[in-house]
């Protein structure tokens, strides 16, 4: 599936970037059979820029694409959420976790009908999972970017540092391609990504909420090549992970030459 699909009749048509595939995108819209049923208390429905939907509970900091309008599915989702919290209670690592954790409740790839949770911190730019054998584990940067791309619509702002690092990485990628370095994208494709980004920034300056589309663009393209696989953790969190990238840039220039 392309990162952008034209949505006819929505008034929000996107040009297509067919060379960017979002194979990891796993959203499944809720069944039309339960579309008229009310959502459980506290849950809100959000629409992804591609037309898919997901559900978010602000107080629980929980997200799911599972059809919680179905009472049976909802019970399974809440059981998975509560079981996950119980598993974390005795893990000492949780004391160092950021307060902005969001819990994404999904079905297991390996065992159908098994529901479990992953955690993400936008402030720290990381994703986490809990394993019975290993406890709390930091997932790959690609996992975090996939989360950014999949659930961009319930936030008014992008993750800290994400936009700056995207611009920086895109500029570096374009420079490498011009020098003949082998790269997943050619110069024309990188220019298309840059143009799309600039148009979204311009629309934002005019008061439009482009955060969902920007999150989708950034999250879907960052994992594709080593140049774009940058962490987004702010400097104060770097020492917790022994990283060498100091991320000291404070401002970003929206105009790329």
Image (spheres, helix red, strand yellow):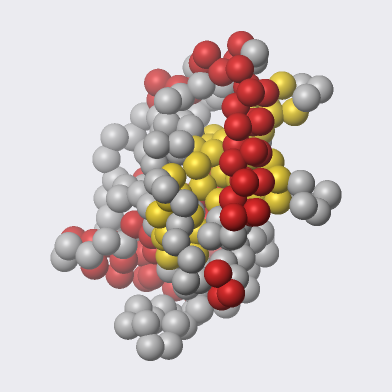
Q: Which of the image's four quarters has the N terminus? A: bottom right
Between 101 and 145, the one nearer to me in the picture: 101
User: x, y (%) of residue 157?
Assistant: 32, 48
Residue 113 visible here? yes
Q: Residue at x 39, y 42 (%)?
A: 58
Q: Is residue 251 left or right of residue 16?
A: left
Between 65 and 119, the one nearer to me in the picture: 65
Residue 50 visible here? no
Q: How many marks?
A: 0
Q: Is residue 9 left or right of residue 92?
A: left
Q: Is residue 34 above or below residue 139?
A: below
Q: Residue at x 66, y 46 (%)?
A: 76
Between 212 and 101, the one nearer to me in the picture: 101
Q: Which of the image's four quarters has the C terminus? A: bottom left
User: x, y (%) of residue 50?
Assistant: 48, 71
Q: Is residue 20 above or below residue 105?
A: below
User: x, y (%) of residue 52?
Assistant: 51, 68
Q: Is residue 120 above or below residue 28?
A: above
Q: Residue at x 59, y 41 (%)?
A: 78
Q: Residue at x 80, y 54 (%)?
A: 112
Where is residue 203, by image quadrant?
bottom left
Pick out the residue farthest to the bottom.
9
Where is residue 159, by image quadrant?
top left
User: x, y (%) of residue 205?
Assistant: 18, 61
């Amino acid at each position: 599936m392309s990162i952008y699909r034209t949505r006819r009749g929505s008034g929000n048509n996107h040009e297509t970037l067919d060379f960017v595939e979002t194979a990891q995108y796993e959203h499944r819209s809720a069944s039309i059979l339960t579309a008229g049923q009310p959502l459980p208390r506290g849950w809100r429905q959000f629409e992804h820029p591609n037309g898919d939907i997901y559900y978010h509970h602000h107080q629980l900091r929980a997200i799911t694409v599972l059809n919680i309008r179905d009472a049976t599915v909802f019970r399974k989702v809440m059981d998975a959420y509560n079981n996950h919290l119980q598993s974390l209670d005795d893990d000492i690592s949780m004391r160092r976790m950021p307060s902005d954790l969001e819990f994404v409740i999904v079905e297991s790839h390996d065992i159908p009908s098994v529901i479990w949770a992953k955690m993400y911190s936008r402030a720290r730019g990381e994703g986490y999972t809990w394993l019975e054998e290993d406890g709390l584990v930091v997932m790959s940067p690609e996992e975090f970017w996939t989360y950014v791309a999949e659930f961009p619509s319930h936030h008014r702002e992008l993750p800290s540092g994400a936009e700056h690092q995207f611009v920086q990485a895109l500029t570096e990628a374009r420079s490498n391609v011009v020098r003949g370095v082998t790269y997943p994208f050619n110069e024309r494709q990188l220019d298309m990504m840059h143009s799309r980004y600039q148009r979204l920034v311009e629309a934002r300056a005019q008061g439009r909420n482009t955060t969902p589309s920007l999150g989708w663009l950034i999250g879907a393209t960052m994992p594709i090549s080593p140049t774009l696989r940058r962490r987004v953790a702010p400097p104060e969190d770097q020492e917790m992970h022994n990283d060498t990238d100091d991320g000291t840039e404070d401002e970003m220039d929206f105009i790329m030459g």
